[in-house]
Image: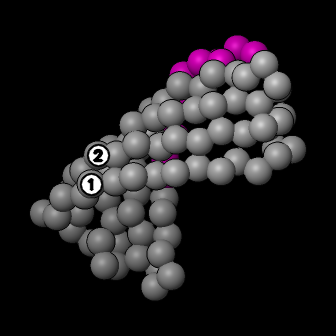
Amino acid sequence: YTDGNGPWSAILTLTFENGSTIVGSVNGLTSATDEGGAQFAGTVAVIGGTGDFAGVSGGTGTYLGGRSGDLGATPLPTEVTLRITES
């Protein structure tokens, strides 16, 4: 990862109002913009869940977003789309 560009990976936990969770492993790529921000996109592999999502054994999705300025200095709006599988 150099100058706001490059690959990244993360663990994503989505927590719902009732406390149920979906957990995914995310791998993506970030591209810096000319304005000092960045655009990013990744793929999600669902690896588990709790509560209403207990028993989730797989699924896939996308993780998209961007920021208009420096990391930590501006909001980081994102969109996650998942297709999950129950065991």
- Give the extent of the magenta segment: 1-12
Residue 44: quadrant of the picture: top left
Up the image or down, 14 lies above or below 17; here it is above
Q: Position of residue 59 (x, y in %)?
A: 24, 50
**Dividing the image into 4 quarters, which one contains the C terminus?**
bottom left
Q: Which mark is residue 19?
A: none
CB under 8 Å between discs 1 and 2: yes
**Dividing the image into 4 quarters, which one contains the N terminus?**
top right
Q: Is residue 3 among what the camera can see?
A: yes
Residue named by callout 2: 60
Mark before the other along the chain sequence, 1 or 2: 2
Q: Which residue does the image show at 41% across and 76% down from the upper left? A: 20
Q: Where is residue 40 in the image (x, y as percent from the top left)?
A: 58, 32
Q: Which residue is most to the bottom?
A: 18
Give the structural element (helix, strand or loop) at label 1.
Answer: strand
Q: Is residue 47 among what the camera can see?
A: no
Q: Which residue does the image show at 48% across and 63% down from the upper left? A: 14
Q: Which of 50 and 5 is in front in this view?
A: 5
Report the side of 22 relative to 55 (left or right): right
Amino acid type for the residue under numbered disc 1: Arg
Q: Which residue is most to the top?
A: 2
Q: Which residue does the image show at 34% across and 65% down from the upper left? A: 49
Give the structural element (helix, strand or loop) at label 2.
Answer: strand
Numbered marks: total: 2
Q: Position of residue 86 (x, y in %)?
A: 16, 64
Residue named by callout 1: 83
Amino acid type for the residue under numbered disc 2: Thr
Q: Which residue does the image show at 70% across and 14% down from the upper left? A: 2
Q: Which residue is most to the right?
A: 73
Which class describes the residues within 10 Å of circle 2: few (<14), some (14-19), or many (20+)?
some
